[in-house]
Image (cartoon, rainbow, N blue to C red):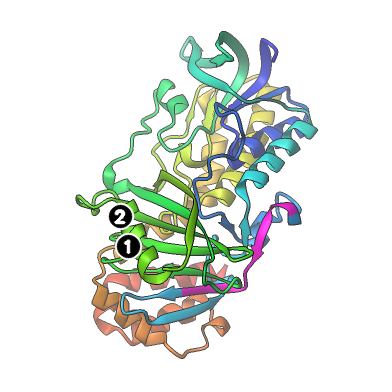
Amino acid sequence: MKDYYDMVVVGAGPGGSMTAKYAAEQGLGVLLIEKRQEIGDPIRCAEGVAKVTLKKHIEPDPKWICADVTGSRIFSPDMTMVEMNEEMSGGEVGYVLERKVFDRALADASAIAGADVMVKTRATGLIIENDTVCGVKVMHLGEEKNIRCKIVIGADGMESKVGRWAGINTACKPSDIETCAQFLITNADIDQNFCYFYLGKEVAPGGYVWAFPKGNGTANLGIGILGSRSGKKKAIDYLNEFKEKHFPESRIIEMVYGGVPVSGPIERTIANGLMLVGDAARQSDPITGGGIINAMDAGKIAAEVAVEAINKGDCSMATLQEYENRWRATIGEDISYTLKVKDTFVNFSDDDLNSLAHSVEGIAIHKMTVKDLLNALFKANKRLLWNLRGLIKEAKKKNSK
């Protein structure tokens, strides 16, 4: 670990590793640091990604693919099932990953590209001079060290300390956080070709339960509920009840807890000499909480902007505004749309959700576009049309592009 780099990336998740990889490939001197001793552990997500978007960044490797699913099965509160194919199922359905291996593969790719990768290295503060971030203070194996650089990338998660140190408000309200818990279960009675989603206030208030296959009779069984709607009952309590009812013969072999931002993006993701990517910038999907691909996409944009800024000799906010503009015009557009959908659907009653499921029961959804699906839903649910007709218009626009 040297005293000076062009770029220091804090956090070796998908967003951080991709930023480091793309920047190093363009000739920047890059340091990627991770506070944990093992990259990719513990796991904090359902591990699902869409195949097409993943392939933009990395060639799939059987070593980190647990399941290749063909679609999703969504259950309303009365257990009416709606089956959708992979293309209709959203950004978390396609491959189910082994994140412990996948995240390490991404970090390995950044190292191969030329980045220095250091684990057990915790950022403790920023070096700020003349209102400009120009380095990171770190603690590595008990030793404090100052690493100077031209640009810092904060990829350090939901309540980013790096962003906060730079004067960016990264705080989350309870209504903006999904409280999550997940079991890795074995002896799971689940079709390995589908990802499963369960809705309803009794099951997961303001969220959903998921079951994602991981091969050999195992599955990720998890839950996300809005912090503002959980009351005194914890996410883990809801999940235990669900497991006993729907997967009574399964056995828990791993367990993780965490929080996922579902607020939409924060107001600002840049400062002089600094950019935020991934959960640190709230770039996760407000409906599903999934953020792997968005973080990787944002990392690529951040790296490209960083290369231009450093070559120009100007890493000010004015120059880094290009990153803000580009990701908000792409990733941000999708997030804005799904945030509106989330804000509407969390207010649906269980009867509303049942009614929507009954509307499309028996319809060949796999042959429909998103626009066709929405029109079919709302044609059969006139009462819900008023609140959601704006979403239909947006869906039509998206499908016409």
Q: Residues within 10 Å of mark 1 (few under 14, many from 20)?
A: few
Local secondary structure at mark 1: helix
Find residue 50 and report its horizontal and vertical position in percent.
Answer: 61, 61
The relative height of residue 294 versus residue 93 in the rendered view (above or below) is above
Name the residue at 67% across, 62% down. 52
| Displayed quadrant of residue 18 | top right
Name the residue at 48% across, 9% down. 130
Q: Depth check: give the residue in front, 186 or 299.
A: 186
Q: Residues within 10 Å of mark 2 (few under 14, many from 20)?
A: few
Location of the C terminus by quadrant is: bottom right
Left or right of 283: which side holds 148? right
Q: Which residues are drawn in magenta?
A: 63-73
Q: Amino acid at mark 1?
A: Glu
Q: Could you tell me if the residues under marks 1 and 2 are in contact, i.e. CB atoms within 8 Å? A: yes
Find residue 17 and report its horizontal and vertical position in percent.
Answer: 65, 36
Q: Which mark is residue 237?
A: 2
